[in-house]
Amino acid sequence: GSAQMLSNISLGGIRAINNNVAWACGNDEMILKTMDGGETWIQKAKGLFPNTDYTRLYAYDENHIWVVGRLSISKDSTSQSIIVYSSDGGTTWERQAEGILQATDLYLLDIHATSLTNVWACGRSSTYITQDGGQHWIRKTGPAANDNNGVCALDNTRAWIVADYCYCGFTTDTANTWAHQTLECSGFVNYIMGITSIDDKIAWIGNYNSKSVDTTGVLYHTKDGGKNWVKQHYPDGGGLRRISFVGDLR
């Protein structure tokens, strides 16, 4: 695509499948796909879901992709959650969980698939899980009452979720209960935005500090499944909304 097409568009999610195929999403119904390593981008699902701002996406492979966000339903900025899905590389799309997404869940903020059947999503005050590729979704309250910003699932039953105000939780029973993991967050406003892991022991968290008194950025790292999180610093202030690298689950 052209620079003009992307003017005034805020992109919030990106996922590379390989050296050639990658996806991105953002506000104003924007779902983008490249098949040539980013030289050209094609908008997908254009006009299918009007008034939707997409926040995050997860492409499991070249063909199967889930995108989440908020659908504006009135002029006073009232919104509701939305999940859209394609199984053919973006040629056709469908909405999922329409009868399950609750009105009080104003938006979804992240989604992660560990297989073509097991998918986790999170957002305002809620977690959503499917184990049949999205034919049926179940809603779980929380774990945080505010924005659950990032999810990294290990399998059908285990996942990390991070949320506003220094929250990190881990579930081993498909989000029925959560173990609150301790992060050292003193000294700044904490919106824990993203988490990724290698396995059930090694993980990293990105922290977005909008009013940090610390001039460095802050990461958290665990080697023991979250029993202990070590604060790590990087030179540039501000914060990281997401973390991803070769070999991780995200």
Image (tube, rainbow, N blue to C red):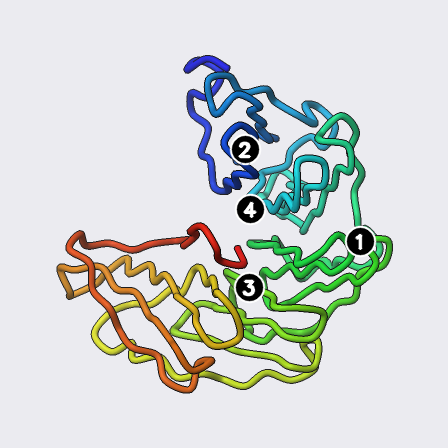
| Residue matched to label 4 | 56
Depicted 159 relative to depicted 58: above or below: below
> Image point 70% across, 81% down: which residue?
173
Q: Which residue is mark 1?
A: 133
Which residue has dot 3 on it? 152
The residue located at (48%, 65%) in the rendering is 198
From the image, tell me which residue sits under label 2: 22
Measuring from the top left, give residue 1's x and y in whole percent: 50, 15
Kind of residue indicated by mark 4: Arg
Task: State the CA–CA distance, disc 1 to disc 3.
Answer: 17 Å
Counting residues from the start of the chain, the first of labels 2 and 1 encountered is 2
Horizontal and vertical percent position of residue 20: 53, 27
Q: Earlier in the sequence, mark 1 or mark 3?
A: 1
Determine contact: label 3, label 4, CB under 8 Å. Answer: no
- Of the numbered discs 2 and 4, the one sitting upstream in the chain is 2
Mark toward the start of the polypeptide (3 vs 4): 4
In what element is the residue under mark 3? strand
Discs 3, 2 touching: Cβ within 8 Å:
no
Q: Residue at x 71, y 31 (%)?
A: 89
